Structures are given as C-alpha cells and as structure tokens.
C-alpha cells in the first residue's frame, strides 16, 4: 500500500501486509488500548487504524505515523513476539493518537507551563532559527533516539527524540501515560521535571474528558 500523505512536502507512506497469523493478536492489542479512551473522544479525530508489517515514510523505516483520520502502525520495527511487541504496539498507537488530541484540543494544553520546565536556555531542535520546516516529517528515529537516558530524565525528557519539537515531547509523555500511567506518575516525584510535565499532559486529557482521571489515578501494576 502506498499513500501520498502530503504532496507539498513530498511525503509518501508505504507499508507491507502484516502476516495473517499475527493479525488477530496485534488487532487485539489495538482494540484493548482503544478502550482507554472514553466513548466519543476519538469519534471526530480517528476513523481507521491500519496495521502493517514494514512501514516507511519516504523510504525511512518507522514504527508509526498518521495522516488526518488514519493511524499507521508498522510492527516490523518491534521484537517479533511477546510482551515487548505488545508494549510497542500499544505505545505507538497512543503516541500517534496524542497528536490528534493535541491538534484538536490545543487550548487545553498549558504550553507555557510545559515549556518553562525545560528551562530558559533550552530550544527545541525545529525551533532553532533557520531550521528546515520539513525536517520533522523527514526525521529519522534511531534506536539511540528512542532509548531513555538518566540525563534526559533529569532534564524532563522521556526519550532523546522528545527534544525535537514540543509535539514529540508531548507525544512521548502521552504514550506512556495512556499505556501505563504509573510508570511516570508513581516513579517520578511530583516536583521533578518529569513529574511536572506528566501532570500537565494528564490535565490535558482530563480537560478533554473527566473520565480520563480514573485511568491516571489507577493503582500501580506490581
């Protein structure tokens, strides 16, 4: 399958079919994760989730991407079986959906407070003067860019690629909070940089629909 997602930016999405024996399992993960969202929350934002084996954007392998109304997930980017694959499928789904949520509900996001946690000297990569506005679409996520580092946690970033732009920073929090909220809310002190950003992201979702509060306050999974 090939989709010309944004001709003005020369973005082409290509995917190869998911093996038949894996379809039901991966679909069950997606369906379970969609239940996190209160009824009606996604109705106007997302109509379709398409599961692929390999997925590329402009020939670059990616784990997920989206165009208006559609989320694409490429499972070949994950380990081929077991808990790790389930985790990455779930987190990729929430990561992509969070972009829809942010776009539709931007006024509910306290962007000023979120940015202030980064400190006065920090600048997202795509906000550096002279940055190419198309780079974020052509970006390459490496294993290193997706691997959490203690130094990044101390600075308020869940993964290195979150420093690319504020949307990716928001996405990186949302994907964990919608999947396993206790990993951020119980692990990091509320007054830490990660704790503060996590609460701001939670507040966005609760402002969208108060039913999200029960998800974010659930007991930790031991």
Image: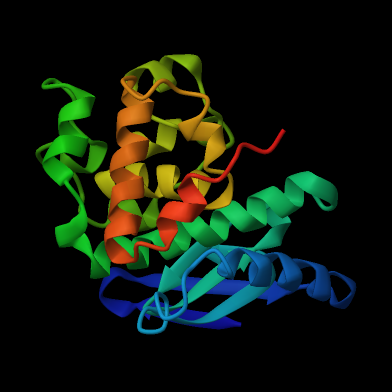
Q: Residue at x 35, y 84 (%)?
A: 44
Say how the picture is coloured. Answer: rainbow
Q: Residue furthest right?
A: 21
Q: Position of residue 23 (x, y in %)?
A: 80, 74
| Tag count | 0
Q: Position of residue 135 (x, y in %)?
A: 30, 51
Indicate whether 34 appears above or below 151: below
For residue 46, which quarter of the picture? bottom left
Does the rendering let one see residue 59? no
Indicate whether 81 appears above or below 210: above
Q: Residue at x 34, y 42 (%)?
A: 169
Horizontal side of 5 relative to 179 (left or right) equals left
| Quadrant containing the N terminus in the rendered view | bottom right
Does the rendering let one see residue 209? yes
Q: Residue at x 35, y 58 (%)?
A: 137
Q: Residue at x 67, y 52 (%)?
A: 77
Q: Position of residue 145 (x, y in %)?
A: 49, 34
Q: Nearer the viewer, residue 123 or 118?
A: 118
Q: Position of residue 130 (x, y in %)?
A: 11, 42
Horizontal side of 160 relative to 110 (left or right) equals right
Q: Nearer the viewer, residue 59 or 167?
A: 167
Horizontal side of 43 relative to 6 (left or right) equals right
| Quadrant containing the C terminus in the rendered view | top right
Indicate whether 87 appears above or below 72: above
């Amino acid at each position: 399958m090939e989709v010309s997602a944004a001709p003005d930016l020369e973005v082409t999405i290509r995917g190869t079919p998911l093996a038949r024996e894996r379809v039901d399992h991966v679909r069950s993960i997606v369906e379970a994760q969609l239940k996190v969202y209160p009824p009606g929350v996604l109705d106007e934002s997302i109509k379709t989730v398409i599961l692929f084996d390999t997925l590329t954007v402009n020939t670059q392998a990616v784990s997920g991407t989206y165009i208006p109304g559609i989320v694409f997930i490429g499972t070949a980017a994950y380990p081929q079986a077991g808990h790790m694959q389930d985790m990455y499928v779930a987190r990729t789904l929430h990561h992509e959906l969070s972009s829809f949520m942010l776009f539709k509900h931007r006024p509910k996001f306290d962007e000023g407070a979120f940015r202030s946690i980064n400190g006065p000297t920090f600048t997202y990569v795509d906000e550096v003067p002279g940055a190419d506005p198309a780079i974020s679409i052509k970006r390459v996520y490496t294993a290193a860019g997706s691997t959490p580092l203690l130094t990044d946690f101390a600075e308020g970033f869940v993964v290195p690629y979150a420093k690319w732009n504020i949307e990716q920073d928001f996405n990186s929090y949302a994907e964990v909070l919608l999947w396993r909220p206790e990993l951020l809310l119980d692990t990091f002190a509320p007054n830490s940089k990660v704790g503060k950003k996590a609460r701001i992201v939670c507040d966005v979702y609760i402002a969208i629909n108060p039913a999200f509060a029960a998800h974010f306050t659930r007991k930790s999974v031991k």
